[in-house]
Each structure stands twice: as structure tokens, then as C-alpha cells.
Image (cartoon, grey):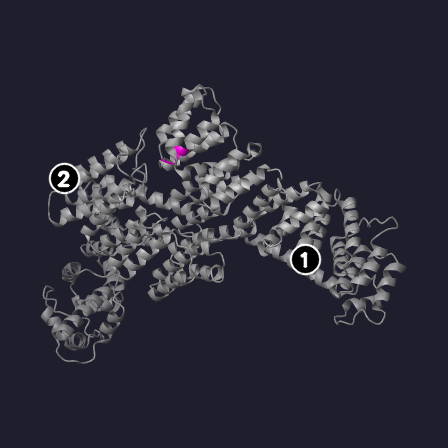
């Protein structure tokens, strides 16, 4: 690979050096006078007969096209437009007013733009038409470049109206029409105009432009250009102006074509005027020639939530003798799919198949969406294959559903394949698609792919980023623990951005970034800025505010007050995710009653619960029972009841399949504190209720964790080992995916609560010597080893003479510092409480008071483990004949731990009094000054 790169580099530098040598040499065809003029840099280069010299040179000899082009470019750069026109008329045109066949795009742009600068618009018009006549078939790219260049210069030198009407005239002359409503097909001609519309505001002149086109060309051209404008305006999300252009077309009585109807449906959906979508769609049946129109129609029906009317109207068709057609099926099926009623959707699908109907796009999309809403991921993939079976092209909305499927399972590779399929099939790609793709990266904390997607969206697909995609990328940075990068995006895109409706999404993520960094003052400053700028808030804003108040400020009453405001908001809706934030905080501080009260408020306000809310509810129920040492049967019955009601859909929930974590946590608790057999029963019930055809949740990481706890608690170590190996293999699989260019930080904590059991398994199977290698292997994989596991490992290794020294090393390097810090802090607080003097507080207590979260070590030797470790070391040293020599070696290697160990006489080590006597100065220095000095007497 390196050799290939080196070879390419050599070729590249050889090419550059040849170019430099050719430039440095004098061009043999040019006279000295001409060369001196072309090399001059001052403004007076064309004075003193300079123009005449260049003109004579071209006129008196047959100049090459390269020489001619260089001279014309030089004259244009010196703004000698009049002379350039004269020269071009003689050297670029033949006697028949035709251009030379070898004319270049640069020459033609210089010539035509000089006509613009000298305001010779009639001549410009004539020459441009000649150019189009001559080259539109043979050199199309040349003509397009010149048209776009003239359009740009006209805007700079005349007016917006003039430049746009000339663009319409030239494009119509070239193509025969100006109906350019497919960016993919007409990108070559539309790219400059799209950039122009994004940068300039034509809201004040669009009517005048369309009127001029109608006057100078004809009404059909004006109608076609209005369609083009609507298409480009909605493409760049300028929906306000797109609606005005639509109103203009309707007022003028221009024909409504398919792209017009699609654009206005898209616009009305953006403004949430869903009733207008259905109205306008039914008013123009002649324009029903775009599949994406139905996407917006279905969204409109779903958002209006008029399910009963739809169902009644559908059923009434059977009673009046007019059987439902395939369109009726599509509309009703999609409306019911919005409710997640998969069974009804499937019955309607079976019914239309029995009537020998061929499914169409709305029917297949309804099936797909019904499976998505019910949480059946495998079913989504099966339904998506039906599009191939029936030869129906998926639409943008169809692919959006599939991207959400991949997002839910964290499969960025599958999502990227869908994006490629959309591109290859010329399916319109929206910013929403990229927002979903980028959000998928948040689940696997791959900020590198997210950054690349963001750039591809802007550069390749020409999609201008708004709050959706910017907020998504900021979310990836936050999940990847890179809040500074999120704030860079905020300052780049939000400051000075006039689109305040989109800004709230960016502000929300900026506040979250400040929260992650502990910058509460800056978070509150952004809250105030939102109020000062009157930025419309959304439901997510309330989530961020509740999180700030509860997590950062510990102001639970105010947080619940904000939740009350949302519950009574006239337009915004509270969801389970708002309650989930407070439940998480209450769970962390063991406020179980608070969790129960929040759940009751959800029931009172008829808010559907999600799996996370049920997780907190069940966890709190078990914790209360465990604290009061009550029998767990009642808590198990609660889990059993929730599972049954969720499966039968008698519980008001947001899902179809209960997430396995809901029963995995109580399963672990039951295994550890009650009855492993009860845990197995719970697992079997869950699989029976939510999985079919022999499937189960046993392959999920969260379930495998519970199964390992279960096997360990009943000491079925062979079963534990098999599950542990599968568990690590699954983690390795995720790490080996093509998209794993950045390690998934969420996988790093996969061993938390599990590795301790693995260490117990090794101890139980007489494999203690494998523990050091196991720890090194887990660290090399980037997996976090929690404090409990380190303590379990150290305790086990100290119990075996073959591994005690490795235990000493780990304790010395990782754990003893945290132990000493904790006990030092306790001692200082005890003295500070007992002291009555008003002296200066110790430095450590001052720092702790300034920041209560400081000096809280994540790794430390537990007190009970420390005592056992010292006892094990006593026994170990007792096996040595030359104890002092061994102590000296350990002091030199593991001084930090040995300092703590030797603080007290080791009375259980044989002949310790003699050792104390021989090394009295060492122990005196150690125990008075807390400092290790040289161990002098190593042997008799």
C-alpha cells in the first residue's frame, strides 16, 4: 500500500515540476513585445500601443487557440472590454457570423461578459442565440457555462429581474422549455440558479419576473418557470416564498402540473396545514403523477388523526355497492398503521389480495410502517422486500422509515447501503434522511462517520443544513463526549442565523453540551438568550430544562413545575421521555416514592409509557421490597402483570415489544437475592409473550448479562463460560464492523457487573492464574473494568501465591491511592468537626467545598478488601526464610502500597519484633513522616 502511495507521489511531483519548467521558459510562438505585455502586472500594461500590438499579433499571423485564449483572458482581466469585443469579432467569428469551432469556454465567457459590461444587450442577445444554435448539440457544456456566466454578470451589473428573464430566455431557446423540476436530471443548468436563490432574496421581485417572462415569451414559459422556482425553493426549504409562487400560479390560472402539486403538499406539511394538503390533492386529480405526493397525503391524514371517519367511510363503501378500490385501501391502511394496529393492517392486506388486487405504493408503505410502529424489525425487512416483488419503486418516505429501522438497531452500515440505493435509484433525498443517518452514529458514538455524512450532505447533495442536521451532529458529539465540538457547530451556524424556528434545535444541544461540561452559568445564559430572541420552543426544550434543573441544580420542585407547564401547554405535548428524565434522577438518589408519583401523574394525564419508564417503575418496586426485606413475590407479580398487559396491549404504551432491559434487571435481582428458578420462569414468560417462531431475546447483550448473573448465582460455571464467550464474541463483532472506524464508547462499559462473576468462575475452577491475562485482555479491548471487579480480582489474586505479586502491582498502581484519599478526607472532616478553633481549613477541604464532586476517586481499594489483602500478605511473607529481604524487594517495587501495609506492626509475620528492632529508623521515619526511606537491613 505504501509503495502505491509513493509511486503516485513521485508521478504527481514529476508532473508539477514539468509544469513549472514549461512556465518558466519563454513561449516560443510569442514575440518579445507580446510576452512583455502579458507578463506586466501594472494597470498601464495596455497603454502605449499595447492593444494594437496584441491585435496585430493575432490579425497578422495565425495564432494558436492557446495563444489567442491567453491574450483574450489578459485583456478581460485588465477590463479592456471595448477592445476585447473588437478583437474577438475579428478572431473568434468567421465571415458568416459563426464562431470558430475551437473556441473555448473562457474565451466565450470573456467575450459575452464584455458585452454585458459595455451594456450592449441587443448584441449580447444575438450572439448568445448564435452560440446556442451552433453548439447546443455538439458542445452543450460550453453553452451552459456561458449562459450561467452571463446570468451572474447581468445580476451584478443590471438587476435581479433582468438577469432572471435573460436566463429564462436563453434556457428556453436552448431546451425548448423552462420546466426544470428535477435537480438530478437538470443539475448542469440549475446548479448556479439554486445557489443564487439560496443567497439572494427574490421575494420582492418574483411577480415582476414572471410577468416579464409572460410578456416577452408567453404564458406557458411563465408557468413553467414558476414551477421551476417552486421546485427549487422547496428543495432549499424556502417554503414561505414557494407558497407565494403557488398563489401566483393559481391567481393567473396557469396549469397545475405534478411538480407544483408535490411542492405545495410539501410546503403545507412543513407549515402543518394538513387539511389543505388533502384539499389541494383532491382538487387537482390531473396532477397526480408523482408518487411522493402520496407521502405527504398520508402524513396529512395521519396528523389529522381522523381515524374513525376514515374507517367509517371505508366500511360504508361495502354497504352502498361500491367496493373499495386500491386507493381506498392505501389511505385507510396507512391511517390505521399510525396507531400501530398491525393486525388490522394485515387483515386489510389479505382482503385485497383475496380480491385479486395488486398492491400499490400506499399499501406496501402502510404495511412497512405498521411493522415499524409495532417494533418488529425483522418484519420491516420482510415487508421492504415486497417492493422488489411487485416492482414498485420505494419513495423518500419509504426509505425514511427504513433508515429509522436501522437507527433503532444502531446499524449504520445498513443505513449507508440504503442511502446508496436511494442515490442510485434517483430517489429524492431530504435533510431528514441525513439527520436520521447522523443520529444513528450517536448510538455507536462514531463522530467520524457523522462528520463525513454532514459534509457529503452539503457538498454532494447540495442540501443546506438546518437545525435538524446540525442538531443531530451536535448530538453525536455529545454522545461521543466531545461537547467542545458541539459548541463549535453552535457558534458557526446559530449566531446570526435568522431562521429562529430551526435555532431551538441547535440551542437545545448547545445547552446539553454546557451541561456535560458542568458549565451551568453558560447553560442559563443560553436559556435567557432563547427568551430574549423570542425563539419558538419545542418539546425537546422542556426536556433540556428539566434535565438542567434536576441533574445540575438539584432543584426537583422547579423541575416538576416545568413539567406541569408542559402538561398544560396549548400546543406542545408531554411524552414519556420528559418523565423519564426525572425518574432517572430520582432513581439515582433512591427517591422511590418520587418515581411512583411520576408514574401516577402519567396515568392521570393519559400519557403512554415507554420501556424506560417501566424499567424505573419495576426497579423502584424491587428496591423497596429489598430494603424492607420483604418477600419478592409481590414485585415479581408486578413484572408479570406488566409483561402480560403490554403483550395484550391493554397497557397504554408507546411500543409493541417490551424492551428486554425491563425484565433483565429484575431477573438479575431475583437471581441474586431470591430464587434463580423464579428468574428463569420470568425469562421464559418474556420470550413466550414477545417472540414467535422459536425466536427469543437470548441473543441481546442485556439478556446475556442477566443469564450470566443467573448462571453464576447457581454456580453453573460451564453455562456461564459459554454465555461469556458468546457475549465477548458479540462485542468483538460490533467492533469489527466496517463502520467501526471510531470505537463505540457505549460498549466500553459492557463488563460492568459481569467481570466480577468471571473472576469468581476462574477461582471456582482452579484457574486463578488466568486472571492477570484476563484483565490485560479486557483492557486491550478498551473495556472498562469497574472498581468492584478490580477489588474482586485483587482479593482473589492475593489468595494464591502464584498471582499475589500481580495483585500487589495492581493494588499499588490503581487502587491504594483512592483508598488513601478517601480515608484522608474522612479524617480531615472528623478533625474539622471536632475542632473548636477558627484556624485556616486544610487545602483539601477547601477544594472539596468549592467543588463537591472533586476528589472522588473512581478506583479505590475497599476497606474490607484492604484488611483481607493485608492478612493474605502476612501469610505470604510467613513462607519466606529471609523475610526482610522479601520485604525490601516489595518496598522497592510496590512502595506506595507497602507504605500503607507497614504503617502498623505485622504481628502475624514470624519474628516481627526482631524485624522492627533491626529496622527501627526505617519504621520511625515511615510512621511519623509518612515517608519510605531505604530498607537497610535486608538480611542477617
Front-most of 782 and 940?
Answer: 782
Q: Position of residue 446 (x, y in %)?
A: 42, 51
Quarter of the view holding residue 904 = bottom left
State the image quarter where residue 107 is shown: bottom right
Picture quarter with the C terminus: bottom left
Placement of 550 over or under 663, stated as above or below: below
Q: Residues within 10 Å of mark 1 (few under 14, many from 20)?
A: few
Viewer-nearest residue: 852 or 613: 613
Q: Is residue 2 magenta?
A: no
Q: Is residue 167 left or right of residue 540?
A: right
Mark 1 or 2: the one toward you: 1
Mark found first going from the N terminus, 1 or 2: 1
Question: Is 337 colored magenta in this rendering?
Answer: yes
Secondary element at tag 1: loop
Depth check, front residue: 83 or 207: 207
Query: Is residue 1 in sight in this rendering?
Result: yes
The numbered disc on residue 374 is none
Q: Is residue 385 visible?
A: no
Can you give x and y, in whole percent of width and height, for residue 783 in the image? Answer: 33, 52
Which residue in the structure is indicated by mark 2? 633
Which residues are drawn in magenta? 335-339
Please tell me whether residue 390 is drawn above or below residue 917 in the rendered image.
above
Residues marked 1 and 2 touching at CB (< 8 Å): no
Q: Of helix, strand and loop, which mostly describes the magenta segment?
A: helix
Give the labeled residue for mark 1: 159
Decide if residue 712 is on the left or right side of residue 465: left
Which secondary structure, mark 2?
helix
Q: Residue at x 26, y 34 (%)?
A: 650
Residue for point 38% across, 28% down = 312
Amino acid at each position: 500500500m505504501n509503495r502505491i502511495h509513493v509511486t503516485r507521489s513521485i508521478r504527481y511531483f514529476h508532473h508539477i515540476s514539468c509544469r513549472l519548467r514549461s512556465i518558466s521558459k519563454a513561449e516560443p510562438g510569442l514575440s518579445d513585445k507580446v510576452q512583455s505585455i502579458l507578463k506586466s502586472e501594472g494597470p498601464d500594461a495596455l497603454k502605449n500601443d499595447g492593444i494594437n500590438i496584441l491585435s496585430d499579433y493575432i490579425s497578422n499571423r495565425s495564432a494558436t487557440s492557446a495563444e489567442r485564449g491567453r491574450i483574450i483572458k489578459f485583456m478581460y482581466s485588465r477590463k479592456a472590454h471595448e477592445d476585447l469585443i473588437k478583437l474577438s469579432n475579428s478572431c473568434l467569428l468567421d465571415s458568416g457570423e459563426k464562431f470558430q469551432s475551437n473556441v473555448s469556454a473562457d474565451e466565450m465567457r470573456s467575450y459575452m461578459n464584455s458585452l454585458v459590461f459595455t451594456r450592449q444587450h441587443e448584441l449580447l442577445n444575438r450572439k448568445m442565440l448564435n452560440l446556442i444554435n451552433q453548439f447546443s448539440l455538439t458542445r452543450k457544456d460550453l453553452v451552459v457555462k456561458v449562459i450561467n456566466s452571463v446570468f451572474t454578470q447581468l445580476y451584478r451589473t443590471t438587476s435581479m429581474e433582468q438577469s432572471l428573464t435573460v436566463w429564462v430566455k436563453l434556457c428556453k431557446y436552448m431546451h425548448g422549455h423552462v420546466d426544470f423540476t428535477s435537480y438530478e436530471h437538470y443539475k448542469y443548468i440549475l446548479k448556479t440558479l439554486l445557489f443564487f436563490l439560496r443567497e439572494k432574496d427574490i421575494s420582492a421581485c418574483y411577480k415582476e419576473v414572471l410577468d416579464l417572462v409572460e410578456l416577452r415569451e408567453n404564458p406557458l414559459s411563465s408557468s413553467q418557470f414558476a414551477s421551476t422556482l417552486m421546485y427549487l425553493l422547496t428543495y432549499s426549504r424556502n417554503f414561505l416564498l414557494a407558497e407565494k409562487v403557488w398563489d401566483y400560479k393559481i391567481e393567473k390560472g396557469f396549469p397545475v402540473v405534478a411538480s407544483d402539486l408535490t411542492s405545495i403538499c410539501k410546503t403545507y406539511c412543513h407549515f402543518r396545514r394538513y387539511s389543505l394538503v388533502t384539499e389541494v390533492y383532491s382538487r387537482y386529480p390531473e396532477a397526480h403523477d408523482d408518487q411522493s405526493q402520496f407521502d405527504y397525503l398520508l402524513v396529512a391524514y395521519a396528523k389529522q388523526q381522523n381515524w374513525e371517519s376514515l374507517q367509517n367511510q371505508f366500511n360504508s363503501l361495502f354497504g352502498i355497492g361500491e367496493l373499495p378500490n386500491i386507493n381506498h385501501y392505501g389511505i385507510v391502511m396507512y391511517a390505521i398503521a399510525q396507531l400501530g394496529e398491525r393486525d388490522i393492517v394485515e387483515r386489510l392486506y389479505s382482503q385485497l389480495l383475496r380480491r385479486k388486487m395488486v398492491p400499490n405504493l400506499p399499501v406496501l408503505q402502510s404495511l412497512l410502517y405498521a411493522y415499524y410502529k409495532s417494533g418488529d424489525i425483522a418484519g420491516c425487512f420482510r415487508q421492504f422486500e415486497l417492493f422488489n416483488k411487485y416492482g414498485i419503486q420505494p419513495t423518500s418516505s419509504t426509505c425514511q422509515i427504513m433508515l429509522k429501522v436501522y437507527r433503532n438497531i444502531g446499524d449504520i452500515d445498513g443505513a449507508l447501503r440504503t442511502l446508496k440505493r436511494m442515490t442510485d435509484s434517483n430517489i429524492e433525498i431530504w435533510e431528514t434522511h441525513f439527520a436520521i443517518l447522523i443520529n444513528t452514529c450517536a448510538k455507536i458514538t462514531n463522530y467520524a462517520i457523522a462528520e463525513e455524512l454532514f459534509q457529503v450532505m452539503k457538498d454532494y447533495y447540495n442540501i443546506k443544513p438546518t437545525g435538524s442536521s446540525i442538531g443531530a451532529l451536535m448530538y453525536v458529539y455529545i454522545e461521543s463526549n466531545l461537547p467542545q465540538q458541539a459548541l463549535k457547530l453552535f457558534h458557526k451556524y446559530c449566531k446570526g442565523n435568522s431562521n429562529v424556528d430551526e435555532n431551538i434545535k441547535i440551542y437545545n444541544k448547545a445547552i446539553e453540551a454546557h451541561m456535560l461540561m458542568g458549565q451551568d452559568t453558560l447553560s442559563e445564559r443560553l436559556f435567557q438568550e432563547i427568551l430574549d430572541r423570542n425563539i419558538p420552543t419545542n418539546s425537546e426544550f422542556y426536556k433540556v430544562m428539566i434535565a438542567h434543573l434536576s441533574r445540575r441544580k438539584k432543584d426537583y420542585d422547579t423541575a416538576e413545575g416545568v413539567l406541569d407547564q408542559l402538561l398544560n401547554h396549548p400546543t406542545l405535548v408531554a411524552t414519556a421521555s420528559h418523565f423519564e428524565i426525572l425518574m432517572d434522577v430520582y432513581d439515582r438518589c433512591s427517591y422511590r416514592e418520587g418515581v411512583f408519583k411520576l408514574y401516577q401523574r402519567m396515568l392521570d394525564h393519559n400519557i403512554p409509557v415507554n420501556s424506560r419508564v417501566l424499567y424505573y417503575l419495576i426497579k423502584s418496586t424491587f428496591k423497596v421490597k429489598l430494603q424492607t426485606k420483604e418477600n419478592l413475590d409481590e414485585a415479581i407479580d408486578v413484572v408479570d402483570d406488566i409483561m402480560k398487559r403490554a403483550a395484550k396491549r391493554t397497557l397504554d404504551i408507546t411500543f409493541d415489544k417490551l424492551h428486554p432491559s425491563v425484565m433483565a434487571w429484575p431477573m438479575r435481582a431475583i437471581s441474586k437475592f431470591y430464587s434463580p428458578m423464579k428468574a428463569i420462569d420470568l425469562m421464559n414468560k418474556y420470550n413466550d409473550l414477545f417472540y414467535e417462531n422459536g425466536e427469543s431475546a437470548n441473543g441481546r447483550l442485556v439478556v446475556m448479562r442477566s443469564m450470566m448473573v443467573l448462571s453464576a448465582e447457581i454456580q453453573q460455571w460451564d453455562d456461564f463460560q459459554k454465555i461469556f464467550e458468546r457475549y465477548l464474541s458479540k462485542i468483538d463483532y460490533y467492533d469489527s464492523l466496517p463502520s467501526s472506524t471510531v470505537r463505540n464508547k457505549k460498549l466500553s462499559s459492557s463488563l460492568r457487573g459481569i467481570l466480577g462473576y468471571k473472576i469468581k468462575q476462574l477461582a471456582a475452577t482452579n484457574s486463578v492464574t488466568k486472571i492477570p491475562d484476563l484483565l490485560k485482555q479486557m483492557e486491550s479491548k478498551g473495556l472498562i473494568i469497574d472498581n468492584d471487579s478490580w477489588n474482586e480480582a485483587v482479593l482473589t489474586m492475593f489468595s494464591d501465591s502464584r498471582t499475589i505479586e500481580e495483585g500487589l502491582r495492581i493494588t499499588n498502581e490503581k487502587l491504594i491511592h483512592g483508598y488513601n484519599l478517601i480515608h484522608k478526607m474522612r479524617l480531615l472532616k472528623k478533625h474539622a468537626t471536632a475542632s473548636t478553633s477558627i484556624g485556616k481549613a486544610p487545602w483539601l477541604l477547601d477544594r472539596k467545598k468549592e467543588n463537591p464532586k472533586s476528589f472522588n476517586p473512581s478506583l479505590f481499594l475497599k476497606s474490607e478488601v484492604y484488611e483481607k489483602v493485608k492478612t493474605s500478605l502476612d501469610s505470604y511473607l510467613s513462607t519466606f526464610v529471609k523475610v526482610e529481604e522479601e520485604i525490601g524487594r516489595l518496598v522497592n517495587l510496590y512502595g506506595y502500597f507497602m507504605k500503607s501495609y507497614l504503617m502498623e506492626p505485622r504481628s502475624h509475620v514470624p519474628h516481627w519484633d526482631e524485624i522492627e528492632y533491626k529496622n527501627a529508623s526505617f519504621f520511625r521515619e515511615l510512621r511519623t513522616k509518612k515517608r519510605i526511606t531505604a530498607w537497610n537491613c535486608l538480611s542477617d
